[in-house]
Amino acid sequence: MSPVAVTVFVGTIVHSRSLTELEILSPGVLGVTAGGKVAFLESLSSDSDRDASTTKILQAHGSEKAHVRKLSPHTLLLPGLIDTHVHAPQYAFTGTGYTLPLLNWLEKYTFPQEKRFASTTHAETLYPKAVSRSLRCGTTTAAWYGTLHVPATKILAQTCARLGQRAFVGKVCMDRNGGDGYVEENAADSLQTTQEFLDSFEKIESDRVKPIITPRFAISCTPELLRGLGDMAEKNSLPIQTHCSENAAECAFVQELFPESKNYVDVYAQHNLLNPRTILAHCVHLSDAERKALRKSGAGVSHCPVSNFGLDSGACDVRALLDEQCKVGLGTDVAGGWSMSIVEAMRSAIIASRVVGFGKREVAKIQDGHTTAHKTLSLAEVFYLATLGGAELLNIQQSTGNFMRGKEFDALVVDLDASTIGQGGKEELGTRTVEVFDHDDAAAMLEKFVFVSDDRNIREVYVAGSKVI
Ligand SMILES: O=c1[nH]c(=O)c2nc[nH]c2[nH]1
Ligand SMILES: [Zn+2]
């Protein structure tokens, strides 16, 4: 017998069971326990008496007293979205600076802005805005980068806890190549402040907000710092996040700095930073050997397509990563990416995958006169990357990522009816306004959600059963 539900949603419910299994229950019935977990998920036969069938399901689960929420026909109940790579301090300059490639962009925009977080007042002003926007976009779990500063990054963790977001929060580590004086004294100093940051989590009032070891990337860390962070992560069984193989100039510089490493991925492997708890952002320019090493290590990739377009970095071959059985999730990478929305990342992941395909077609034509098939990422696949794939990458798939019984209820109620947007209804329609017609079935509504919707369509957001939006 499943646990008793106190709230039951009846309507169109969509989630991924795996990369290849998108389940659409239209209609479905989902029960949530008083403790905020999924009690049961069942489908209703569409031609039966919906009320009578719902009552039978409630009886079977001992949940007759539950509050029943009937969702309207243009509403979807979806798992919460997971942003596996995002920079909170960069929220302030989102949407600017896309004329420069990565290393120049870091120097000109990023380091000066991140330096400002030496002020806790600045952190207290900005971080609630960044976390609220992320939740508003339906992100129920985020892997955040803070800055070099412990007090400000503690404020970021406290903000996630207060606003109810499930989060991993990292104090960024850099002991070389920081422009504008944005750099720590040395490896020992960076390791000591990281330990201080880890210790501060005893006071964080949420067991859903956790620390994550965060070397910025190989360029900004000496071998001593990388090794120290690898050992600290191992000793405390902590997750690790960093950047890898995003941009051609970056890759060349890494080769110069680490001549004894076989390749970029190997730099992290050699410093005890590559294991099943590692999240590497980008991985746009990996070789086959690097993809194999990644898979063997159990580390995974945060694919950030909007950022890869924004900073002109390239198009990541996610299909090759998936074929190699690497773990993959999606990231917004604000402010390399111009949007806090994982929905924007989903649609951009499809476009990036098509771009990869265009390139392969050209090569195939030149080589042998006919095209090589490239399997573009499907809608079902990007939906998985945005939800369960992200949970698997962050190793929290036992708690979240889909609506399997016993998981915490992290969910979005998405209303696709344009006429309910804004006070004035139809007059306020914009280019990103979804309209649903009577020929639209559940699959079409999901497609419209991914390609056309925006955060106005996300009406309710739940983390572990608590409404946070
Ligand atoms: O997109 C990125 N954003 C960053 O802040 C960063 N730092 C190193 N490499 C990076 N890439
Ligand atoms: Zn990044």
Image (tube, rainbow, N blue to C red):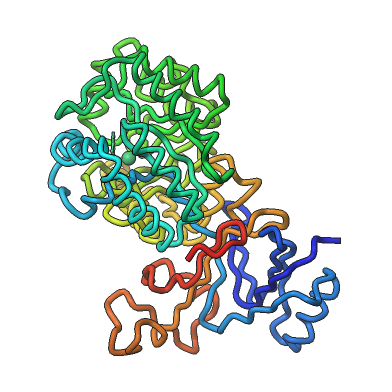
> How many dots with numbers?
0
- Where 128 sits versus 89, above or below? below
- Along the horizontal axis of the image, is 187 left or right of 319? left
- Along the horizontal axis of the image, is 248 left or right of 32? left
Residue drawn at x 36%, y 35% is 151
- Along the horizontal axis of the image, is 355 left or right of 8? left
Toward the viewer: 460 or 381? Answer: 460
Please identify the residue farthest to the top as the structure is shown. 260
Q: Which part of the image, by quadrant, shows the N terminus?
A: bottom right
**Residue 28 % position (x, y):** 67, 74
- Where 183 sits versus 94, above or below? above
- Where 451 sits versus 439, above or below? above
Residue drawn at x 33%, y 30% is 216
In the image, ligand 2 is in what quadrant? top left
Toward the viewer: 307 or 189? Answer: 189
Toward the viewer: 170 or 10? Answer: 170
Residue drawn at x 42%, y 66% is 450
- Where 61 sits versus 389, above or below? below
**Residue 42 % position (x, y):** 73, 69
**Residue 334 % position (x, y):** 31, 49
Image-quadrant location for residue 338: bottom left
Q: Is residue 370 visible?
A: no
Residue drawn at x 41%, y 63% is 136
**Residue 159 % position (x, y):** 43, 49
Q: Is residue 22 visible?
A: yes
Toward the viewer: 128 or 459? Answer: 128
